[in-house]
């Protein structure tokens, strides 16, 4: 049971097994990687690339993959997944970042969503392929991941959306294809609350059944610009972690803007003595390991 931090700032926090730095989040803003941290890169979600090249945006019958298009769950501007210059630039960038960190965790390394992309280039590539639409998209995504694998010498973790059923139809993502190239998966389960842990546990069980490589789960603790009233409670985070631990996750990442919110989470977690006692009764070895890890934070304060 491994625990990691997932932050927008390059400061490590004691009490975790590993640290993932968001060197290029979906905003497209780039940070310098840290040699002793993993680097997280959003590949096609990239506001800067779309600002500089508006014609690169992914298209669909329900409009472009642009922030504000509420027909999709799209919070960023997303580049078409076959855009050759972006693909090539990102491959070089990924290799460069990999050389200066412990490895790379990718997200947004697939099509924007259902129906994407119908730009003129994609229409032509699809027509020339002679393949079924979903199969063509899958090939485009998988071929790109194989190119990424050739460039990444350290650990490669592929982040996926928390949708175990429709990933192929929505994103062109085939989990078995990804498992050939990924060292591990990370299922991004971000939410502003985890009030119904049963649903998250069910998702974790679904991924345990489907994924042929170990997987982490990323939980949302405190994002940039949040206030304390709109983020998950410590009780929810501990409970959902325990429920997903017993469902077979390899470990968890906790997303915050920086180190201070992670420390706040650690302090709040060890103060939950009654809840932790109750959570001890939830299951076997992975649950006990998780709670032992939380208990170890007491020594640091
Ligand atoms: Zn396209």
Image (cartoon, rainbow, N blue to C red):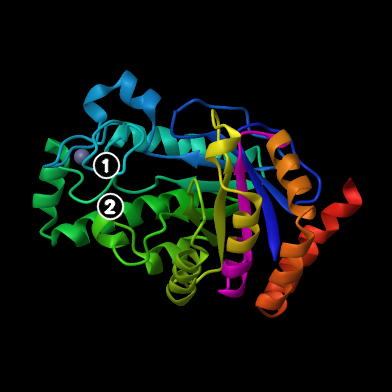
Q: Residue placed farthest to the front in the image?
A: 274
> Is 278 positioned to the left or the right of 51 in the image?
right
From mark 2 to mark 1, how far is it between C-alphas?
A: 7 Å
Between 205 and 129, the one nearer to me in the picture? 205
Q: Position of residue 243 (x, y in %)?
A: 58, 69
Between 258 and 270, the one nearer to me in the picture? 270
Q: Earlier in the sequence, mark 2 or mark 1?
A: 1
Q: Is residue 183 visible?
A: no
Q: Which residue is mark 2?
A: 140
| Quadrant in the picture for the N terminus | bottom right
Q: Position of residue 50 (x, y in %)?
A: 32, 25
**Ligand 1 location (quadrant):** top left
Q: Is residue 209 visible?
A: yes
Q: Quadrant of residue 263?
A: top right
Question: What residue span does the magenta drawing correspond to?
Answer: 241-259
Q: Residues within 10 Å of mark 1 (few under 14, many from 20)?
A: many
> Is 67 positioned to the left or the right of 36 in the image?
left
Q: Which residue is mark 1?
A: 82
In the rendered image, residue 301 lying in the magenta stretch gets the answer no
């Amino acid at each position: 049971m491994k625990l990691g931090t997932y932050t927008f700032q390059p400061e490590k926090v004691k009490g975790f097994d590993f640290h993932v730095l968001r060197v290029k989040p979906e905003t497209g803003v780039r940070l310098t990687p840290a040699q002793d941290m993993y680097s997280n890169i959003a590949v096609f979600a990239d506001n800067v690339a779309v600002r500089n090249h508006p014609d690169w945006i992914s298209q669909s019958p329900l409009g472009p993959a642009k922030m504000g298009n509420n027909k999709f769950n799209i919070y960023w501007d997303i580049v078409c997944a076959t855009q050759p210059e972006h693909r090539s630039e990102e491959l070089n960038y990924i290799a460069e970042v990999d050389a200066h960190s412990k490895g790379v965790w990718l997200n947004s390394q697939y099509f924007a969503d259902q129906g994407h992309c119908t730009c003129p280039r994609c229409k032509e590539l699809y027509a020339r392929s002679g393949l079924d639409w979903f199969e063509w998209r899958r090939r485009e995504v998988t071929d790109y991941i194989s190119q990424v694998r050739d460039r990444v010498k350290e650990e490669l973790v592929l982040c996926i959306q928390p949708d175990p059923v429709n990933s192929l139809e929505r994103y062109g993502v085939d989990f078995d294809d990804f498992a050939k190239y990924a060292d591990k998966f990370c299922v991004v389960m971000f939410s502003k609350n985890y009030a119904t842990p049963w649903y998250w546990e069910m998702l974790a069980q679904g991924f345990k059944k489907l994924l042929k490589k170990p997987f982490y789960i990323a939980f949302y603790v405190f994002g940039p610009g949040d206030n304390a009233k709109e983020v998950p409670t410590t009780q929810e985070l501990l409970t959902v972690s325990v429920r997903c631990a017993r469902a077979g996750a390899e470990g968890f990442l906790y997303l915050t803007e920086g180190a201070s919110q992670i420390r706040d989470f650690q302090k709040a977690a060890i103060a939950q003595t009654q809840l932790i006692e109750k959570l001890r009764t939830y299951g076997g070895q992975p649950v006990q390991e998780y709670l032992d890890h939380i208990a170890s934070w007491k020594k640091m304060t």
